[in-house]
Amino acid sequence: MTENKVIRKPLQKRALEKKAKILATARKLFSERNFFNVSTNEIAKEAGLSIGTLYAYYNSKEDILIELVEEYHQTFLTIFAEINQSQSFELFKTDTQKWLLNLIKRLISVEDEAFHQEIEMLAMTVPEVKKVVREQQNKMKHLTYEHFLYYANQSNPQQIKILSTIIFDFITSLVDEVLYSEHTEKEAEEIISAGVAAIDLLIKAYLT
């Protein structure tokens, strides 16, 4: 990271639009060319802004990256937060497979394949990215845990915490398999269906 300086916090519409343009441009370039092969000068030029304007909002390319990673994961946190409502809790308890299917299809629909792959690579090489990814995943695991705790009427919290971690990883692997391996539409649907059935069996084996 470069040394800290006073960074503009955009409040006006025009300033917010400039910051959004910087983020969108950086995300596109990082996905296409790899974070390490993109400079702040290239981001500014592609966004149609001066380098001085870019540095008015961000200290460094790394700061842009961290905000993009946080923004990316916030999309998934929002989904998990939305399902953490009373109606969703009831569906989870009465029709777990339908709840799982809705969740998996929602996660698939919002995934950005190119940027996801870039984050996966950067999480292994950039400590700040690894930290953000881990923090966001832990938040999503906790929201999954809340559903299982409700399902089991608040009993065996430690066992449920372990189960929620296993199920979260299972769901993540299932989504990645559908998105990043070559499958026909029919094969993808079959994989999702089989995965949902397997997760449902695992949940019931542990919680009933």
Image: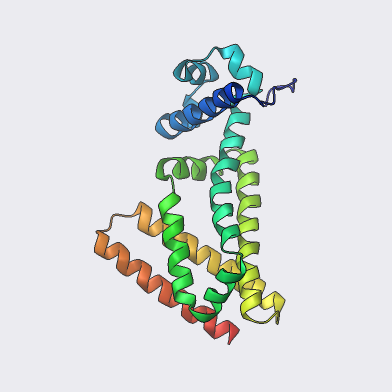
Q: Give percent across and percent down for residue 126.
A: 60, 38
Q: Give percent across and percent down for residue 17.
A: 55, 25
Q: Is residue 117 left or right of residue 22?
A: left
Q: Give percent across and percent down for residue 2.
A: 69, 22
Q: Residue drawn 49% across and 30% down?
A: 24
* Vertical order, 9 against 74 (above or below): above
Between 168 and 125, the one lying in front of the other is 168
Q: Residue drawn 54% across and 52% down?
A: 76
* Vertical order, 161 against 156 (above or below): above
* Vertical order, 54 against 174 (above or below): above
Residue closest to the far bottom:
208
Q: Give percent across and percent down for residue 166.
A: 56, 69
Quadrant of the snapshot with the C terminus: bottom right
Q: Residue drawn 57% across and 13% down?
A: 51
Q: Residue drawn 59% across and 53% down?
A: 77
* Vertical order, 7 against 149 (above or below): above
Q: Is residue 167 left or right of residue 184?
A: right
Q: Quadrant of residue 185?
A: bottom left
